[in-house]
Amino acid sequence: MSVAIRIDGDRLWGSLMELARIGATPAGGVNRQALTDQDKQARDLFSRWCQEAGCVMRADPIGNLIARRSGRDDTLPAVMMGSHLDSQPTGGKFDGAYGVMAGLEVLRSLHDAGVVTEHPIEVVAWMNEEGARFAPSMMGSLVYTGAMSLDDALAIKDVDGLSVGHELTRIGAQGSPDPYGKPAAYFEAHIEQGPILEAKGKTIGVVSGGQGQCWFQLTLKGRASHAGTTPMDLRSDALVGAAAIIGELNRIGRAHQPGCATAGRVLVSPNSPNVIPGSVYMTAEIRHPEDSVRAAMEQAFREAVDEAVRRNGLQPQLAKVLEQPAAAFDASCIAAIREAAERNGYPCMDIISGAAHDAVAMSRIVPTGMVFVPCAGGISHNEIESAEPADLAAGCQVLAEAVLSHAYSGNS
Ligand SMILES: [Zn+2]
């Protein structure tokens, strides 16, 4: 049986604004990359706030920082909320920070109302979700869920040669092996980072899952030669081949919406105005919520590469460097989020997560749900990222009720 609690939207907004002062940039954003001094300050502030709300803090060996609020039966698995405190170098105030501060606001509201839940409740700040300083992204949740080994993660270095392990120790963020088993459920609130909710006039996105993705690296070798003396029909122009592939990739993405296909990086060699490009390195990525459609998109991409190679007399080297299947979130978590939105009269819609999140990693091992709220213009990973206090409060209220529906609460 669950009791009603009301979260405090003003307090949530105040916490977000205070947190955003740590690593604040002149353009109104945040630079708080993983395991920097700014990250440490944010972690310390989060810890203090959670302790003031009656929680016990712990960290695990990869630096995931977890606040725990006891339940009536502390041997039961926790119901967990969370997101991340680290940011892109030119990040915004809300990406990640919102999910952690929304979790904190739920803890504070439970504390103020004297609610005792049957299950313990936890809020986690995942280490290095962004992958900006240390690749890959979602490092903390990947290690927590066993998708990446701790030793591999600790050895990863930033551009200055400093390792994750070194920096964890330096800022005192490394903890001990987690004494608790996996949680009963995981919920994450996050800004949408896309334009759909705003365009449809919805306050709450009920996330049904994350789309699958595959990344490719392609090198096309042609023949560099003089741009004035080599007749057009005797050329092996690697950039012309790459251009054709990029055009096809865009067509493939358009033809398989809501899927996406992107060539994000192109390096041309020798990159000189009067030399026919002798080689091109490029990346391609393909995403779709259905794995079978993504496979068809990949096939079409491979055919486009073959065609461009044949037409331009090129030597291709194509490698798939990442493949992640689509993630389906848990039916009972999704239902809890939708019911909470409807109970409060918030306009809501089902939505797929276009970006990867810690929740996608968690969904591989525990029942998981995600709440999206709109952000202005759909813009994120940008210092101008912004969101409305009322929308953030609504998402937090939905988060609170979804968590309570899985944690069986009553008044003490
Ligand atoms: Zn994020």
Image: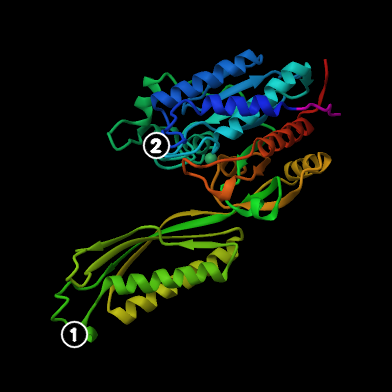
Q: Which label is found at residue 231?
A: 1
Q: Secondary structure at mark 1?
A: loop
Residue 12: name its quadrant.
Answer: top right
Badge nearest the viewer, 1 or 2: 1
Magenta segment main secondary structure: loop
* Mark 1 or 2, nearer chain start: 2
Can residue 142 be seen here? The reply is yes
Instruction: State the separation of the CA atoms marked 1 and 2.
Output: 51 Å
Name the amino acid type tagged 1.
Pro
Secondary element at tag 2: helix
Which residue is under mark 2?
A: 152
The one of 399 and 81 positioned closer to us in this rendering: 399
Residue 33 locus on image (x, y percent): 42, 33
Magenta range: 1-6
Residue 3 in magenta stretch = yes
**Up/down of 17 relative to 264, above or below:** above
Residue 272 position in % (x across, y down): 18, 65
Tell me what residue is drawn at x 16 percent, y 81 percent: 230
Q: Residue at x 60, y 46 (%)?
A: 192
